Every structure is written in C-alpha cells, then in structure tokens.
Image (cartoon, rainbow, N blue to C red):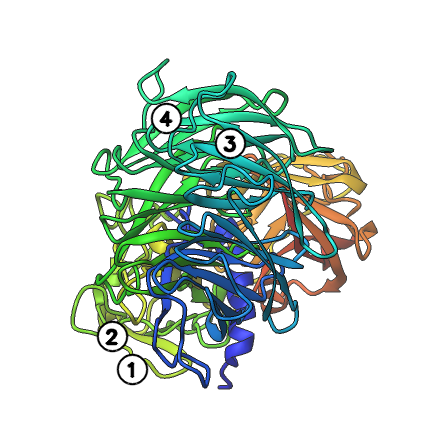
Amino acid sequence: MKSLTKKTRRLGQLIIALALALIMVTGTMAGPAPLAFIEVLKDGDIGHGEDPVDGLHGAYSVIVSPDNKHVYAAGVFDDAIAAFSRDAGTGKLTFVEVHKDNVAPVDGLDGAQSVTVSPDNKHVYAAGEFDNAIVVFSRDAGTGALTFVEMLKDGVGPVDGLSGVRSVTISPDNKHVYATGGIDDAIAVFSRDAGTGALTFVEVLKDGVGPVDGLDSAQSVTVSPDNKHVYAAGLLDDAIAVFSRDAGTGKLSFVEMLKDGVGGVDGLDAAYSVIVSPDNKHVYAASRDDDAIAVFSRDAGTGKLSFVEMLKDGVGGVDGLDGAYSVIVSPDNQHVYATGSTDDAIAVFSRNASTGALTFVEMLQDGVGGVDGLNNAKGVTVSSDSQHVYAAGRSDNAIAVFGQAIVPTVLFGTNTIPANGANLATGPTQITVEFSEDMFSGDTDHSAKHVGNYILVEAGTNGNFDTGACNDATIPGGDDTQIVINTATYDGSDPFVATLGINSGTPLPVGKYQLLVCGTTSVWNAANTIELNGGASDTSSTFTVQVTTTIALPSTGFAMRRTTMLPAQPENKAYTETTMMLEIPKLDVSIPIVGVPQRDDTWDVTWLNQSAGYLAGSAFPTWAGNTVITGHVWDAYNQPGPFSELKNLNYGDQIQIEAWGLTYTYEVRESKLVTKKSVNKVLQSEEYDWVTLVTCEFYNPFTGDYLFRRAVRAVLVSVR
C-alpha cells in the first residue's frame, strides 16, 4: 500500500479540516488553534546565521515588516536595533545585522525602546528614550539591511515632545509619524517624506495644555487603520487619550479621555499599551497595575470609545496578564495577544469581531512546556499573515517565536481501513486509522496505543447511531451495541497509522458500524501538547458489513395503467423519519428524506409514496462516502412518481439536500443504466461526499416488472 507523501498529507490536512468541520466530526465545534513555541533567539547566540545574534540585550520592542520578510527588535541595554530575515513558512529568524548607538553614523538609539516599519516597507523608525530622539533608517526590502538617514532630537530645532520618548508609530497612509514623550507627557507629530523617510516637525500636544488630558507619562501611541484617529496610553493618568487626525497635515485635535474608575471604565490602572483592531471596530489597552486588558468599542466617525469589558489576570480563568505590558490584535481580527511582564508570559484570546469581547484561550509561559525567551516579556507583534507571533523578553535578551499549532486530524485516505462509508462483504477483524501527524505513543491515556481512545459501536434496531461522542455520559448510547477493541498498536513511523484489533479476532457480523476516534477525551500529538481536533471534537467513520451476493436493488416502480392496493407496512420495515429534504431544481422535486432499513437482502420501498428513501448501509446523507437515495418512478396510484424524470438529469445539474439549516449542493457527474443486481456498482464507496439517486426504468408490461435501474451520481460542491 502506497503511503501519502508529507507534502500531500499537508494539503490533505487542509481538505480534511474542512471536511471534518462539515461532515465527519462529532461533538462541539472546534475552538481556536493554540500557539506552538518554535524557537528563541538570544543575544550572543549563533542562531541560524554565521554571525552571533547581537542587539537584543534588554530586548524591548519587536516588529514584523508589512511584507513579512524581516523582523526588527530594539535592545534597550544594547542601545541598538537588530535586524533578522524571516522564513515565511516556519516563522524562524536569521540574524542579519545590528545598528548600535554611537557606532558611526548611527546616533539617537540610547535606551532604544520602540521600533516600527513604515507601511510602504521603505523605512524603519526607532525611539531612543535616553537620547530623547527618533532615529530614521532606510530599508533594503530584499536583505532587510538598514541605512542611517537622520536623528530628530528633543529641543534641537523646533522638535518638542520627545523627552523620554517611549513609542513611535506611522500612519497607515504613510504620511505622518507620531511619538510619545514619557517625560514631556506629550505626543509629537511629524510629517514624513515617503521617498527619503526624513521627518519634519509639525506640532506637539502636551498633557494639561489646552483641552488635552490623559497623557501624563505617555507610553504608547497608535493610529486607527482608517487614518482618522490617534489613541495614546497615559501611564500616570491611568487613561487613554483620543484625538481626531487631519489626514492632510497630520495635526491632532483632542476628542476625549477615558480614565480608570470614571464612568464605569476599568482596567486602565497604569495603562501601558493601546491598539486599534484592524477592522476599526474596537480598541484594546494593556494596564500594568490592573494586570488587565480593557476592551472598548469605537465610533468610527468620532473616534470616541465605549467601555465593553475588562479581562483581569486570575479572574474567570484568565492567566498570563500579571504586569500586562503590550497588546496586539492579529491582522485577521481573530485573536488578541498580550504580554504579562511579571508572568513572563503571552496570554492568548479569541476575539468576537462583532462585540470585541475576548475569550481566554491559553497562556504561554517562560520555562513551561519548552517555552523560552519570555522572561520579563515586553513587546509582542504578529506577522501580517497572522501565522506567527514574536515577543521580546527583556530579561532573557531574546525574541521568542511562536506559530499557529498544527492540530492533528484523522486522514480518510488509503491507510484508514475500512474507508468511511464502505460496504464490506466480509466483516473485518482489525481497523487501521491514519493520523495527519505523529501521535503520542507513551503508556498513558493520551496515547494512540490506548484502546480507550477508540469506540466502536453497531447500530441497533432503529438503524441509527445513538452514540454521539466519546465524552457522552453513557457509552454506548440508545440501542447501540459496543464492540470490544482488544488492542491498539502504534509505532510512530510514517505514515502515522494505528492498528486496532477488534471483536476478539472474530469477523464482524452483518451490521452497520461506527468508529469514533476520540478527540474530546482524547488522543494527543507526539509532543503531548495538542489533542486530536484540538480536543473539541471526535472523528467519526462508518461502514457496513453486508452479504452482497444476493442483495438486489429495490424495485421503485409500480405496474402502469392500474392502481395498486398496498398492504399495511410491517413494523420491521418501518421507515425512519428525518428532517432532511431532497431538492432537484431541474425536475421541480422537493420531497422529504426517510431512512429505509435493509431487510431480506434488499430494501423495501413500497411505502415511499412522495418521499425519497435513504438506503441503510450506504453513507448517511451529507457524510463522506456514497449516499444512495431512491424514489418511485411510478406510484401505486398509477401516477408518475417524484423520480419519473430522473433520466433527464445531465452532467452539471444540481441535487440538493437540506439538513440542519444548511444546503448541501451536489453536481451530477454520471447517469447510467444498471441491472437490479448491480448493488456494488451503485453502493461503491467514495473518499468524499457523493449522492447516488436510483429509480426504475424500462417497464415490461408483460411481466409487470422493470428491466433496469437508473443511477445518477453527484458529488458535493458546496455547503451553505
């Protein structure tokens, strides 16, 4: 058996992830993917390059260039900016160069606190707190290397507001630069020459001057993505100051101040960092003394903020925010990341894009689970593709690199046997399950070798699977029968396949079976850090054991030119009602779907009338495999049945199943005539979600029988 290549498996993983979400996963919906630690680069380490890493002593700020090619960090004790090239796939960094204060021609980096890259990728700007200066570099977009352009220093010429400069940022329209002066309690405004990167002083806004308030010990400053407003965090004012922005001149007008403890606002005690979400809807602030993230909704017209909530360290399960310092929203608007300098940690939250509300996901802490580089964590940033997170660890003199963790899944390829939806002539004595990643193989209940991570049940007389998930209170559920799994073997070799010995070595008898591979209880990846399906759901696979040599396709038409009197429907042939509907737009068909049990080597569809019958033993409707659905071509009342025009369906015509509030749309790929004995052809299983519609054709008036069956096969193309 040929195994999938790693490249193919990665692609398959993406496909399977969608399939799992739509058709093959039981249990609760999957939550946000956790972060995985990738590497740490420390000052003095060789890293991935030939030269030792330099410039990270007292690493304080870190930024990814908008083109995702490079990362820059400010080292407060090295008085330096370090440049790294970035592997866009892995997120790993390679040291490129360092620029240090007073190493000609560089000046202005004494106490380098903040670094940022212009949105047009042309220039890098850094704040030197002890030099009271902003330093400008031009950037080589290919290599990431920097060239000193100029320094703007507080009190030199007209420049004001840079005493104790803490933060520097650039407007998204590339026109202006804004910097906070922690000692000046101010925001300094500069216009920017997009060609050279050079700055020209425009104005300064100081705390207590005119209407301006909230800038006492101004720390962080940010410009809204729509270029309309500027927000700044005032450490000693416990506040956020809001300004409107003139996009032409860059000048600011004070709008309002939101202060901790005033008007219901909470979470701004010693406000350190402030950021606007990329969708312009919300503002988030990190407060050191509240150990919290404060959330605000934003009026895009006025820039004014309304308090939404506070997430506080140690409250409601939140962790990692002790000494909250920096906060950032991922470019895809899905997550918020914050550093806790006292916790030596990054706190991860999922974000409700509508309300702005946050839900705690996890904490990544220095020294826990292999994480390194977060001692006294300061700045945090996210790559523009939202795939990697970078954090500066001041006491570790380091940059820690994280990526979206790969969540293991079950692959429904050639190595998972029986295939999902398979129809077997002989009952198996073993089952193989292929995972997308290497799984844990230790001697614990997290292991792929632990038989408790697999549940095999046979459907009872109702024909349905009543065992919903591995974490159900009762296993098996309803009238299901649990089949013993005697052994589970797994050696971690590629392909990553677990082999299950079942039913004490006796072949499974005729019946309908479901295997649950447990993600909710559950089997973990090889590092023992991430559960199958992220722990949010199980993976289900079904198959049927049946004697196919004597089974015949059902007769779906009555004799023509006469009415047929129907007997009462026997209880053992009763159909299972569902809420699903079958739609065939071209034929103007819209009828309910019922489940037809298999009895006496066939399916009795006598009583379908104006319903469509899903044949037990084929894949459950909307599941991967092949769902066989029948309908009458001619009914008992001597009238055309709902499938009377089935032969008129052509390639590309649509078939739809309405189920659970979703519309599953299939497109016809094949229409053919088969004999009533062509059970295997009609029920053949598929890797993905297929539907086969079957009815009778070519009525023989002499025998009152139909000579052939019409089989129309269609594949799933969309779910909405």
Residues under numbered marks 1 and 4 in contact, where contact means CB atoms less than 8 Å apart? no
**Separation of marks 2 and 4 at Cα, in angstroms:** 43 Å
| Viewer-side residue, 49 vs 110 | 110
Q: Which mark is residue 231?
A: 3
* First reached walking from the N terminus: tag 2 or tag 4: 4
Query: Residue at coordinates 28% horizontally, 63% vertically from top-left?
Result: 529
Residues under numbered marks 1 and 3 in contact, where contact means CB atoms less than 8 Å apart? no
- As helix, strand or loop, the secondary structure at mark 4 comes to strand
The residue carrying mark 1 is 491
| Viewer-side residue, 445 vs 534 | 534
Q: Residue 580, can we see it? A: no
* First reached walking from the N terminus: tag 1 or tag 3: 3
In the picture provided, is 540 more to the left or to the right than 455? Answer: right
**Separation of marks 4 and 3 at Cα, in angstroms:** 18 Å
The residue carrying mark 2 is 441
* First reached walking from the N terminus: tag 1 or tag 2: 2
In the picture provided, is 442 more to the left or to the right than 574? Answer: left
Query: Residue at coordinates 38% horizontally, 77% vertically from top-left?
Result: 496
- As helix, strand or loop, the secondary structure at mark 2 comes to loop
Residues under numbered marks 4 and 3 in contact, where contact means CB atoms less than 8 Å apart? no
The residue carrying mark 4 is 309
Quarter placement of the C terminus = top right
Amino acid type for the residue under numbered disc 1:
Asp
